[in-house]
């Protein structure tokens, strides 16, 4: 090979190499999504907004938006790629029930068992799901798409993924990112609505201490809860069954190792996988659409409607309760499924007006009821639309 032939050989291969780099394939959409990923990581690390969710999702967004030439089998939507195999657990609804198993193993339902009325608050907050569903229909989304969008109002990322994988898998990335984003922003979204809907007198209401719940009640609750809810909505069995199974592992007292695994290593591993792959699914070439922007707007509306429904239900319920038995409406926001973030918001806002009025344990009742409520609502939507 002479000198000119060698230079031509090197030049051709260098040109081919450069054409395959991300620099040659990047678009403005990729840059936008990389900035979004960096914002998520910043909010998680610097602001403390749900770092267990936003760090994996934010980094996943970076991974998903490294531009590449089609056919290299590295993208999350390319059959046979590693990311595509990991994404299997999202698109087929495998990861969400495992998350629910861990949630059940770490959840104490005592506050709900001691005051069953709080279950109604959790149910009222599901207004966000059906409100967003109606809005999505009005905006031209199909019934199945509207059902998937509506579930964002439950403030439950795993439930949103599970329902969307069955009803509208093409919207999975947008709905999952929207659900997890607004879960992280609960401390920002809910307080203004809570203050707007309540009076100072209502914010100062003191609730009676919760009664002590027996071990027998704690053991019976997941068994009865599973049978009751799944008989009503069999479609919710994968989520509800795993939630109550995890709780039975916790409360039985004889399966501590299993409960510790479910609420520790197992849920951590699944959280990493679900966060990374959901983030990577925001590939700019498929994610940046008008529908995605509409879903984000509807997600915000659904959270606002859910908060409104929970707070207003407590206010209405108080009209029928005797003095001394009334509930503080500030716990109404906790009816969404963002555990324990929304219950902490109730506590923080309550302490602003009375430094000695601790609402956290009271708010945990509707908060855990919201977990059950969102899964039941998911089962209803799947039963009607799947």
Image (cartoon, rainbow, N blue to C red):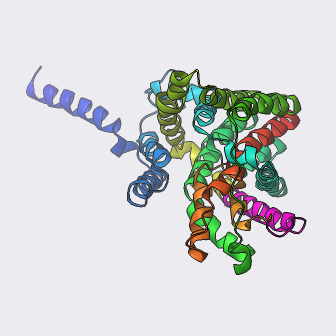
User: In which quadrant of the rendered image does the N terminus lie?
Assistant: top left
| Residue drawn at 54 percent across, 39 percent down | 278
> Can you say whether 22 is above or below 222 in the image?
below
Query: Relative to 31, is 113 on the left or the right?
Result: right
Q: Nearer the viewer, residue 71 or 347?
A: 347
Q: Residue 198, position in %: x, y?
A: 73, 75
Q: Is residue 199 visible?
A: no
> Can you say whether 254 is above or below 232 in the image?
above
Q: Can residue 352 be seen in this view?
A: yes
| Badge count | 0
User: In which quadrant of the rendered image does the C terminus lie?
Assistant: top right
Q: Which quadrant of the view contains residue 22?
A: top left
| Residue drawn at 83 percent across, 70 percent down | 323
Q: Residue 174, position in %: x, y?
A: 62, 47
Query: Relative to 163, is 123 on the left or the right?
Result: right
Query: Relative to 325, is 292 on the left or the right?
Result: left
Query: Relative to 274, is 59 on the left or the right?
Result: left
> Can you say whether 258 is above or below 194 in the image?
above
Q: Nearer the viewer, residue 301 or 309?
A: 309
Query: Bounds of the magenta span?
Result: 297-324
Q: Residue 210, position in %: x, y?
A: 70, 53
Asked if residue 268 is among those painted magenta in the image, a careful observer would answer no
| Residue drawn at 70 percent across, 34 percent down | 218
Q: Residue 208, position in %: x, y?
A: 72, 61
């Amino acid at each position: 090979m002479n000198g000119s032939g060698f230079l031509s050989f090197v030049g051709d291969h260098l040109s081919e190499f450069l054409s395959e780099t991300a620099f040659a394939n990047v678009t403005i959409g990729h840059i936008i999504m990389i900035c979004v990923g960096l914002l998520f990581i910043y909010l998680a690390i610097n602001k403390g907004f749900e770092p267990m969710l936003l760090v994996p999702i934010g980094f996943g967004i970076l991974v998903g938006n490294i531009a590449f030439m089609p056919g290299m089998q590295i993208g999350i939507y390319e059959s046979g790629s590693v990311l595509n195999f990991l994404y299997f657990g999202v698109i087929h609804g495998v990861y969400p029930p495992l998350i629910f198993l861990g949630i059940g193993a770490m959840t104490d339902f005592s506050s709900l068992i001691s005051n069953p009325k709080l279950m109604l608050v959790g149910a009222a907050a599901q207004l966000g799901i059906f409100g967003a569903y109606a809005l999505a229909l009005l905006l031209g989304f199909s019934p199945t798409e509207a059902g998937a969008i509506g579930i964002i109002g439950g403030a439950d990322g795993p439930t949103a993924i599970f329902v969307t994988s069955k009803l509208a898998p093409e919207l999975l990335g947008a709905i999952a990112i929207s659900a997890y984003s607004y879960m992280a922003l609960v401390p920002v979204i809910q307080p203004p609505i809570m203050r707007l809907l309540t009076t100072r007198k209502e914010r100062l209401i003191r609730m009676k201490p919760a009664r002590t719940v027996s071990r027998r009640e704690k053991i019976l609750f997941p068994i009865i809860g599973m049978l009751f809810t799944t008989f009503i909505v069999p479609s919710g069995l994968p989520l509800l069954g795993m939630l109550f199974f995890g709780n039975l592992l916790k409360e039985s007292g004889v399966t501590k190792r299993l409960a510790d695994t479910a609420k520790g290593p197992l849920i951590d591993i699944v959280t990493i996988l679900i966060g990374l792959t959901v983030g990577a699914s925001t590939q700019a070439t498929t994610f940046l659409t008008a529908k995605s922007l509409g879903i984000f707007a509807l997600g915000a509306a659904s959270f606002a409607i859910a908060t409104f429904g929970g707070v207003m239900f407590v206010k209405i319920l108080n009209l029928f309760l005797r003095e001394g038995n009334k509930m503080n409406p500030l716990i109404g926001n906790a009816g969404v499924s963002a555990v324990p973030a929304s219950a902490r918001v109730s506590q923080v806002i309550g302490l602003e007006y009375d430094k000695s009025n601790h609402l956290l344990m009271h708010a945990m009742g509707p908060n855990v009821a919201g977990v059950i409520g969102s899964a039941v609502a998911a089962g209803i939507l799947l039963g009607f639309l799947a």
